[in-house]
Image (tube, helix red, strand yellow):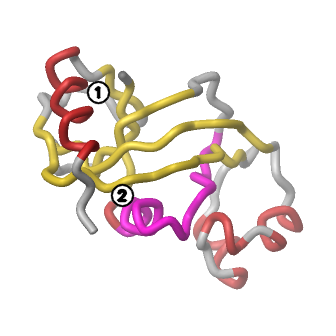
Amino acid sequence: MKGLLIKERWLDLILSGMKTWEIRGKATTVRGRIGLIQSGSGMVHGVCEVVDVQGPLSLEDMQANCHRHCIAREDIPGVVHYDRTYAWVLQGARRLSVPVRYDHPNGAVIWVNLPEQVDRQVEAASRSVRP
């Protein structure tokens, strides 16, 4: 399983179900179940499915979809600094009952290939989701 590194602010919004678009500067070919990792924590905090990619998005597209990416309309120009902007469409986000520790590889800034043992622990923790 792959793990996606996300800053705490955005991760909390994804895990609450409010944020269904993760905004990035490149498209991804990854689809299916992924782990959601809080940047800098060394912990997988949740899981979701990557089901699609939208983009490249215009400023107008971003403004029309604030409810999906949770960036305030007026903040978009100051927050999004990509040459091209893409929305990674997420579905079914769930917080783990207990976060799962993993060893962070040097240089990983977007994706982490999580070992099978971590994948099994994430699967077990995702069965009993915190309310």
Q: Earlier in the sequence, mark 2 or mark 1?
A: 2
Q: Is residue 1 left or right of residue 122?
A: right
Q: Residues within 10 Å of mark 1 (few under 14, many from 20)?
A: few
Answer whether labels 2 and 1 touch (C-beta < 8 Å): no
Mark-to-mark CA distance, 2 and 1 = 16 Å
Q: Quadrant of the N terminus?
A: top left
- Estimate the x, y position of residue 79 in percent, counting from the top left: 58, 68
At 42% across and 36% down in the image, what residue appears?
110
- Estimate the x, y position of residue 131 in percent, counting from the top left: 28, 69
14 part of magenta stretch:
yes
At 38% across and 69% down in the image, what residue appears?
9
SS for dot 2: loop
Q: Residues within 10 Å of mark 2 (few under 14, many from 20)?
A: few
At 13% across and 51% down in the image, what residue appears?
98
- Estimate the x, y position of residue 89 in percent, counting from the top left: 65, 46
SS for dot 1: loop
Name the amino acid, label 2. Lys
Give me the disc on residue 107: 1
Name the amino acid, label 1. Gly
Q: Which residue is mark 2?
A: 7
- Estimate the x, y position of residue 16 in percent, counting from the top left: 43, 68
Give me the disc on residue 66: none
At 50% across and 65% down in the image, what residue appears?
17
Q: From the image, state whether disc 2 or disc 1 is nearer to you.
A: 2
Q: Residue furthest top?
A: 116
Q: Which residues are magenta?
A: 9-25
Q: Is residue 50 left or right of residue 66?
A: left
69 part of magenta stretch:
no
Q: Residue furthest front?
A: 128
**On screen, residue 116 above or below 129:** above
Instruction: Note whether residue 105 is visible.
Output: no
